[in-house]
Image (cartoon, rainbow, N blue to C red):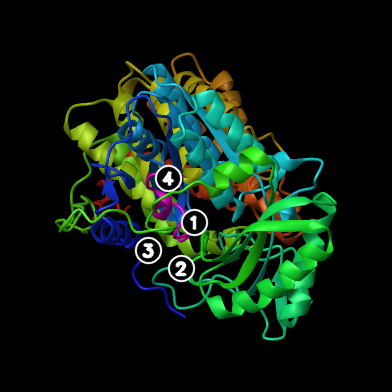
Amino acid sequence: MTVLGTATTFKRDWLDGFATAYGRTVRKVPGAYGVVVRRPPRPGKVAVVIGGGCGHYPSFAGLVGPGLADGAVVGDVFTSPSAEQVYRTARAADNGGGVLFGYGNYQGDVLHFGLAARRLAAEGIDSRTILVTDDIASGPAEAPERRRGVAGDFLVFKVAGAAAERGDDLDGVYAAAVKANAATRTFGVAFGGCTLPGAREPLFTVADDAMELGLGIHGEPGVRTVGRLDPARLADELVDGLLPELPASGRVAVLVNGLGRTKYEEMFVVFGRIHERLSGAGLTPVHTEVGEFVTSLDMAGLSLSVMVLDDELAELYAAPCDTPGYRGTGADLGPVEPVRTDDAGLERPGEVPVAGPVDHALTAAMLRLEENEDELGRLDAVAADGDHGLGMTRGLRAAVAAARSAEKAGDGVSGALLAAGTAFADVAGGASGALYGVLLAETGAGLRGIDAGDITPAVLADAVDGAVRAFVDLGGARPGDKTMLDAIEPFRARLRACAAEADALAGRAEAAACWAEAAEQAVLAALATAHLTPAKGRAARLAARSKGHPDPGATSFALLVGAVAETAQQALTDKELPNADVQPQP
């Protein structure tokens, strides 16, 4: 099955269409890929702002409306929105009562929403964050913080929205959301993979005679493969997976969630057996829903979510709401003009001469990563969602455009790198977007006040040291976790050692030579990650599959610094600077 649209414009096009179709309920945030409630809430109300990658409708934008979320921000397909997009949407949703952020427990979302929360705090806007961790297949019961958020997102967001609607303050809304998350468990199954927009083949396939249990909502395969089950046996498998973590009796809300391709009628067939099994186990379903709430594009499959109810959760979950994707259509406000976002950078202009050294270096890196985009995607798909190559090229195109603009405006190396890092993080999204963004920006900060011709090995090593410290502080990875840090740290160490060995009169040429030595070390280190087992990010869940394959982040870093090394040597030999014929593509 083919998903309509292209990877380049999918987020823009569907969000414009959604905002046009449901303009009576939501309005698009100017300058952001986000929507907020059309009619502003009462002054002082807590704003519930949810979000994540697109491909999950009605989550997240479809859950915006009175009684549920006040705003939603969306990233590219299966990719977290950038911190800038989160910030703009939160500012548009805030009504004086503070902001509750709600999203699934994925590293990219954690990084970007966390950065946005810091920025809000600096401006005096208080916020809290609820990480949804309902998926029992992604972590043990004794470590719920390791679990990801799947269809339970909807249940938690519904409770949080109702608490905000009844007038709870920020701490009260947060407490209700925490309680809902702690009471919610989900287990799912896939019958067939999902297809990314514009792709000809699905992200993964499931054999005709098999099912994948414990699937994720980003196209990740399941953790256990079983033979095809009939509806009753499938229901038993799902219920049996949840029962060990449910009480022996009590009221429950039950959600059977379709993942995009499974028909409602098929889900109803399974639900009958689910209800029978839960009731037979002593539980009392009092709120039941069957439908699509957190999908995964066109994935074939479904999940079962159960939230254990006390009096407060039962009241909040049953409270009315009015959103495009759940319960009601809202008041008819009459015709709304179509929303069309004018995105700069979607067109590929003719050749443009590079503007300066940062543009020169990043252009070389962009061209190198474009050449290797498919291979990076293949490496990422081994144990994750396969989007690393696309994210890197998208981010570098934005970085090139930003650096070029900055250098044309007269900014030096520092300003150009800061602009490039901000643009990379905003457009690439995901964990890699935030992490590469901080590397570029913090390297620029370390070169503040220094002209390109005055960069010495020591100055360059100091700047990279500072960038790596910021990288580690933001991402939390350690050497040996099988992340890009396993190439970055050897690169940093070799650069520092070379700087220490350099002559006191060493200048730009020696700095370029030290960079080249460090880049060679990064290449070797990236290859060596094939022997490591991932301990961070999505790949950690399927660590065994990653063994024998280099880490995609470490590989992209080695490619990037290697391309910069080559172009720096080229510049020193006075060869003509290459032209770049591409601009950023969100």
Q: Is residue 365 visible?
A: no
Q: Could you tell me how far apart the alpha carbons at marks 2 and 1 are, in whole angstroms?
A: 9 Å
Q: Is residue 35 visible?
A: yes
Left or right relative to 136: residue 167? left
Picture disc at residue 81: 4
Q: Could you tell me how far apart the alpha carbons at marks 4 and 1 are, in whole angstroms?
A: 9 Å
Sequence order check: which comes first, mark 1 or mark 3?
3
Looking at the rendered structure, the secondary structure element under dot 3 is loop
Q: 10 Å neighbourhood of mark 3: few (<14), some, or many (≥20)? A: some
Q: Could you tell me how far apart the alpha carbons at marks 4 and 3 are, in whole angstroms?
A: 15 Å
> Mark 2 sits on what residue?
196
Nearest to viewer (mark 1 / mark 3):
1
Left or right relative to 265: residue 223? right
Q: Residue at x 34, y 46 (%)?
A: 34
Q: Could you tell me how far apart the alpha carbons at marks 1 and 3 are, in whole angstroms?
A: 11 Å
- In depth, the one of 65 and 485 nearer the eye is 65
CB atoms at circles 2 and 1 under 8 Å apart? yes
Sequence order check: which comes first, mark 2 or mark 3?
3
Q: Which residues are magenta?
A: 55-66
Looking at the rendered structure, the secondary structure element under dot 1 is loop
> Mark 3 sits on what residue?
7
